[in-house]
């Protein structure tokens, strides 16, 4: 599960100490998965007990908060009782997905709060499919900056997603279209999306990618960091018509035909997090905008994964 080190202009726990939180996240995630799996194997998902409730008490503190509770009225032999049925997974594979889904709110918390400050999260991010895709499909060793707002000269600009891996940065623009099958990269300014002969013109993602590249290069140069990067246009459901244009230098156009291989290479990466990677992330974070307020004392409670 990739680690969300920056979201928009929200304050992030990672920007306070990039050398502490990545390893802490990996350890917490592993420890609590092992606890949950052990309880699952011990059978705390079995049917209603004699008292008409799940054996919720046998779960480690906080794990039960992963599961949505749904009210459901059931008839018993002698009387009616109202019970709250826990929507438990029924297999280990379901358990893994449920666990990953349960980590999303935790990730968002670390990406919007520190122990003393907080930012106000837009509710749309809780259901953002692209954000969930990045977080759940990549290993823990990848650090994600999602729609970061950065300082460029005298302006603050939202740039493309940055996926910082152990061996390099990928500057990613996701290209999707509700009715698209084929992408024609016809010019620097605009591309054409086609399906069954019907064409739609869209802005070329290359302009935004180059602007993000300018930011990344300037940060690397400022801190004298030698760390590779590539620009990526990613489209999971459309193909590229490569006869229409030449792929620019240090750029990958990943369409439907090559998407699975691209993703497999990322998921198969076994390289651990590296100091250079963390240093690059630290420097990039220094040049991001952050908007936050002080957390009141009553809001100082911490997620169970920190306890």
Image: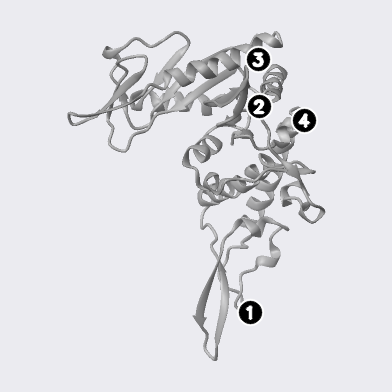
N-terminal-most mark, 4 or 2 = 4
- In this rendering, the answer to whether 280 lies above or below 17 is above
In the rendered image, which residue does mark 4 sit on? 17
Q: Residues within 10 Å of mark 1 (few under 14, many from 20)?
A: few
N-terminal-most mark, 1 or 2 = 1
- Marks 2/3: CA–CA distance: 11 Å
Residue 23's disc number: none
Residue at x 62% of width, y 79% of height: 50
- Marks 3/1: CA–CA distance: 61 Å
Q: Residue furthest right?
A: 297
Badge 1 marks a residue whose secondary structure is loop
Residue at x 52% of width, y 88% of height: 77
- Marks 1/2: CA–CA distance: 54 Å
Q: Nearer the viewer, residue 250 or 285?
A: 285
Q: Nearer the viewer, mark 3 or mark 4?
A: 3
Q: Residues within 10 Å of mark 2 (few under 14, many from 20)?
A: many
Residue 288's disc number: 2
In the rendered image, which residue does mark 1 sit on? 51
Instruction: Tell me if I can see residue 141 in this picture.
Output: yes
In the rendered image, which residue does mark 3 sit on? 219
Q: Residues within 10 Å of mark 4 (few under 14, many from 20)?
A: few
- In this rendering, the answer to whether 36 lies above or below 286 is below
State the image coordinates of residue 233 (x, y, percent, origin top left). Answer: 42, 22
Q: Residue furthest left?
A: 197
Q: Residues within 10 Å of mark 3 (few under 14, many from 20)?
A: some
Cβ–Cβ under 8 Å for marks 2 and 3? no
Q: Give the quadrant of residue 239.
A: top left
- Marks 3/4: CA–CA distance: 18 Å
Q: Nearer the viewer, mark 1 or mark 4?
A: 4
Q: Quarter of the image containing the N terminus?
A: top right
Instruction: Tell me if I can see residue 225 in this picture.
Output: no
């Amino acid at each position: 599960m990739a680690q969300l080190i920056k979201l928009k202009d929200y304050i992030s726990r990672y920007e306070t100490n990039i050398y502490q939180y990545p390893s802490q996240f990996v350890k917490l995630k592993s420890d609590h998965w092992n606890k949950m799996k052990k309880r699952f194997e011990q059978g705390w998902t079995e049917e209603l007990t004699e008292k008409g409730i799940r054996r919720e008490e046998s779960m480690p503190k906080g794990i039960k908060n992963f599961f949505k509770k749904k009210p459901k009225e059931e008839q018993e032999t002698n009387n009616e009782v109202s019970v709250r049925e826990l929507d438990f997974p029924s297999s280990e594979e379901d358990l893994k997905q449920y666990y990953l889904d349960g980590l999303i709110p935790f990730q968002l918390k670390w990406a919007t709060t520190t122990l003393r400050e907080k930012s106000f999260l837009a509710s749309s991010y809780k259901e953002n499919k692209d954000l969930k895709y990045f977080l759940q499909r990549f290993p823990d060793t990848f650090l994600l900056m999602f729609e970061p707002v950065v300082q460029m000269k005298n302006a603050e600009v939202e740039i493309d997603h940055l996926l910082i891996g152990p061996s390099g940065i990928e500057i990613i623009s996701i290209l999707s279209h509700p009715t698209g099958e084929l992408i024609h990269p016809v010019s620097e300014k605009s591309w054409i999306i086609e399906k069954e002969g019907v064409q739609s013109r869209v802005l070329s993602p290359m302009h935004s990618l180059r602007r993000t590249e300018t930011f990344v290069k300037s940060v690397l140069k400022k801190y004298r960091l030698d760390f590779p990067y590539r620009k990526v246009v990613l489209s999971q459901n459309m193909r590229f018509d490569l006869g229409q244009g030449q792929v620019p230098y240090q750029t990958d156009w990943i369409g439907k035909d090559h998407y699975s291989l691209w993703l497999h290479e990322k998921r198969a990466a076994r390289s651990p997090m590296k100091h250079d990677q963390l240093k690059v992330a630290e420097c990039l974070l220094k040049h991001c905008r952050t908007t936050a307020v002080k957390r009141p004392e009553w809001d100082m409670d911490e997620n169970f994964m920190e306890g």
